[in-house]
Image: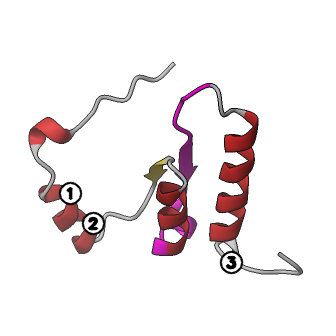
Amino acid sequence: RQGKTGSPKGAARIVGDALATLRRTRAATGARPLLRADSAFYGHATVGTAIKAGADVSVTVRMDPAVKAAIATIPDDAWEMIEYT
């Protein structure tokens, strides 16, 4: 990116490039990369790029009505515990 710009501008390309580099350098590990991002990167382009590259995604977003409705559709047995180290 050149000059002053908002955080998400060009994010999909940056994420795609980073995950491609990671894939080349850590191909033998078999571990899935994790993209963690704040709400500035909450959009189809960035998240879709990460998922297409085989990454898991965690994005912190505002709990607006659409997000709450989407969460309500997730079955109780689909949730996974996060183990913090």
Marks 1 and 3 in Cβ contact (< 8 Å) = no
Pick the residue in front: 29 or 40: 29
Distance (Cα) linking label 1 and label 2: 6 Å
Marks 3 and 2 in Cβ contact (< 8 Å) = no
Q: Which mark is residue 67?
A: 2
Question: Please, is residue 28 above or below residue 79 in the view?
Answer: above
Q: Measuring 54% from the left and 64% from the top, which residue is drawn there?
A: 49
Badge 1 marks a residue whose secondary structure is helix
For the N terminus, the image quarter is bottom right
Instruction: Name the kind of residue labelled 1 in the image.
Output: Ile
Could you tell which of marks 1 and 3 lies nearer the N-terminus? 3
Question: Please, is residue 45 above or below residue 52 in the view?
Answer: below
Instruction: Name the kind of residue labelled 3 in the image.
Output: Lys
Badge 2 marks a residue whose secondary structure is helix
Magenta segment, which residues?
29-44
Badge 3 is on which residue? Answer: 9
* Residue 82, quarter of picture: top left
Badge 1 is on which residue? Answer: 71
Inspect the magenta stretch and tell me whether residue 32 lies in it.
yes
The x, y position of residue 39, in whole percent, is 51, 64
